[in-house]
Image: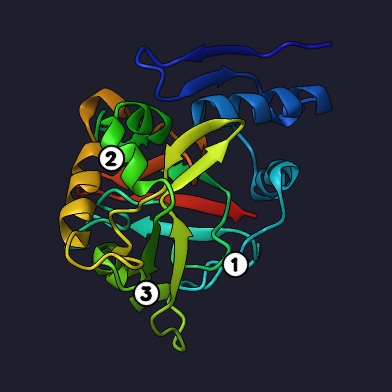
């Protein structure tokens, strides 16, 4: 049996895995799944997967999920192109902490992001990740009890929607209106609890009127504490894979040319 070589980040927010995904074995996929459940986000450096190989790798983790806001890649329907040009103005797509498509009734479990083209300058266009296992563990006990059975109201027109404008102008679907759903604020993965409250999408809390703004504000601030965060720097070919139930992520502001291929799975 071929064991994977891996290394968690210094603060346990995520984990680097050192293997060539072109040659990944079935038993290694199971190891990757276990590490994903444990750390929430995995980083695969120095990869060279073509789109077909990338789609095939993602298929080991679930069935493709449609992203309702953008049209897919013209040749690969499971891939969505996230592109920023140096002439673009305004915020980058996904700038602001969130979890992908949490406004859907059945949000995607996992997201894959592959760097196709990135700025050459180091640190430009990093993605921030925030581990929500650690965020939950650090909550005051009274807040844990308060949110245990609460449900958040998630909307496609939440704060993060503003960052989609440029992408939707080029690749958007015309029929989209607001999408809303409700989800428990506390989720569990392999017996560990995590905060599921996307600051970019949560617009309210079910059956909580007077305190909801205060509670959402507290959680949104707490969730992105630097103790739970890791800034991942991209190189061409790199792939990140994360759980949308245990991680928040956010693009960082930058100017330059960057193209990413995104896949989400159920």
Residue at image coords 82%, 28%: 26
Give the residue number, with chain letter if any, for mark 1.
66
Residue at image coords 54%, 39%: 188
Q: Residues within 10 Å of mark 2 (few under 14, many from 20)?
A: few
Give the residue number, with chain letter if any, for mark 2.
143
Residue at image coords 25%, 45%: 219
Q: Residues within 10 Å of mark 1 (few under 14, many from 20)?
A: many
> Decide: marks 3, 1 in contact (CB < 8 A)?
no
Give the residue number, with chain letter if any, for mark 3.
168
Q: Quadrant of the C terminus?
A: bottom right
Left or right: 69, with 53 as reference point = left
Q: Residue 69 location in percent, x, y?
A: 45, 73
Q: Residue 36 location in percent, x, y?
A: 58, 30
* Residue 141 or residue 265, whichever sits in front: 141
* Callout in the foreground (3, 1): 1
* Residue 238 or residue 2, whichever sits in front: 2
> Under tag 2, what secondary structure?
helix
On the question of residue 165 being in view, the answer is: yes
> Decide: marks 3, 2 in contact (CB < 8 A)?
no
Quadrant assignment, res 90: bottom left
* Whole-number angstrom distance, CA of label 2 to CA of label 1: 34 Å
257 up-or-down from 171: above or below: above
* Whole-number angstrom distance, CA of label 3 to CA of label 1: 15 Å
């Amino acid at each position: 049996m071929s064991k994977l070589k891996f290394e968690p980040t210094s603060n346990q927010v995520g984990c680097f895995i050192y293997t060539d995904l072109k040659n990944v074995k079935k038993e290694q996929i199971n190891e990757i799944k276990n590490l994903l459940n444990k750390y929430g986000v995995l980083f695969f450096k120095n990869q060279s997967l073509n789109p077909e190989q990338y789609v095939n790798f993602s298929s080991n983790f679930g069935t493709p999920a449609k992203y309702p806001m953008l049209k897919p890649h013209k040749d690969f329907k499971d891939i969505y192109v996230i592109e920023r040009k140096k002439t673009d103005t305004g915020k980058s797509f996904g700038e602001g902490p969130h979890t992908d498509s949490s406004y859907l009734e059945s949000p995607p479990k996992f997201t894959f992001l592959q760097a196709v083209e990135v700025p050459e300058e180091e640190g430009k266009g990093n993605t921030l990740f925030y581990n929500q296992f650690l965020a939950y563990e650090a909550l005051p006990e009274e807040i844990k009890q308060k949110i245990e059975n609460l449900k958040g109201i998630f909307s496609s027109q939440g704060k993060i929607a503003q960052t989609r404008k440029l992408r939707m102008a080029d690749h958007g679907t015309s029929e989209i209106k607001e999408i809303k759903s409700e989800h428990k604020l506390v989720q569990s993965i392999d017996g560990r609890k995590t905060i599921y409250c996307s600051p970019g999408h949560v617009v309210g809390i079910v059956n909580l009127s007077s305190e909801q703004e205060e509670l959402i504000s507290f959680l949104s601030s707490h969730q992105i504490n630097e103790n739970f965060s890791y800034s991942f720097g991209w190189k061409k070919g790199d792939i990140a894979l994360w759980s949308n139930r245990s991680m928040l992520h956010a693009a960082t502001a930058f100017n330059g040319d960057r193209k990413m291929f995104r896949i989400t799975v159920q």
